[in-house]
Image: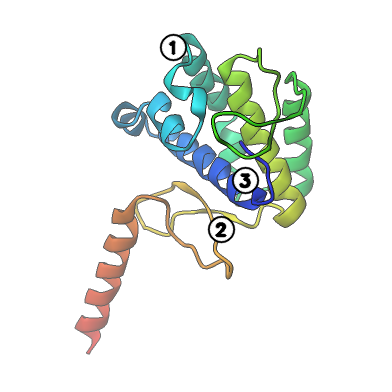
Amino acid sequence: MYVTSGHETEIRLTLEAAVDLVNSLNDPSASESTPTRELLHRHGFARASTAPAAEVRRVDERMGRLLERFNSLPDATEDDTIAWVNAEIARLAIAPSAVTHDGAPLHIHWTPTTAVFDDQVLADILMALVHELCDHGTKRFGRCAASDCEDLYYDATRNGSRRFCSNPRCASRTHTADHRARQRQT
């Protein structure tokens, strides 16, 4: 994750990656269609394409152990969330440094250059969550409003109006059903 003058964008992107990863791990068929390596690469984790398979597998395992916590974010108290995030961060070898590379602007790397990929991913996600907790608590996390979906979402809209996960079919099905119901009433 890059933390720059536009750090809010990077925090949002990292939290969206975390939510997509959580939803993928919650639904094994989703993780088969979009493997973790591809998902993380798509979300801008530069080392995702070259990380050893064992380290990518450990991302799944380690995030899998945190699924319950991430899934509980929409209902969790801020104090409980802070306590578990702090406990997870304490387990990581975090050594922040300011760096530039590959044409990217000056940004913070939370882990040393020698860190394994799964440590880097977990540190990026947890530190983005810390920033979010400091700025907004847990109120930007929610569950999809589609009747047949329990996926998590991260709402970065200004007015907090997001209601659906990243699957466009959820919003479409719900809006279509609502429209048809209104048409039947008239």
Q: Which residue is mark 2?
A: 156
- Residue 172: x and y in percent read 28, 62
Q: Amino acid at mark 3?
A: Ile
Q: Residue at x 74, y 34 (%)?
A: 84
Marks 3/1: CA distance?
A: 26 Å
**Other residues around mark 3 within 10 Å, as few (<14) / some (14–19) / many (≥20):** many
The answer to which image quadrant residue 69 occupies is top right
Q: Secondary structure at mark 1?
A: helix
Judge from the rendering whether residue 10 lies leftward or rightward of residue 174; answer left or right.
right
Q: Dot 2, how many residues are within 10 Å of its Cα: few (below 14), some (14-19), or many (20+)?
A: some
Dot 2 or dot 3, earlier in sequence: 3
Query: Circle 1 sits on which residue?
Result: 53
Q: Secondary structure at mark 3?
A: helix
Nearest the viewer among 154 and 80 is: 154
Q: Which residue is mark 3?
A: 11
Lateral position of residue 39 relative to residue 16, left or right: left
- Residue 3, given in percent of the width and then of the height, sits at 68, 42
Outermost residue toward the bottom in this view: 186
**25 or 126: nearer the eye?**
126
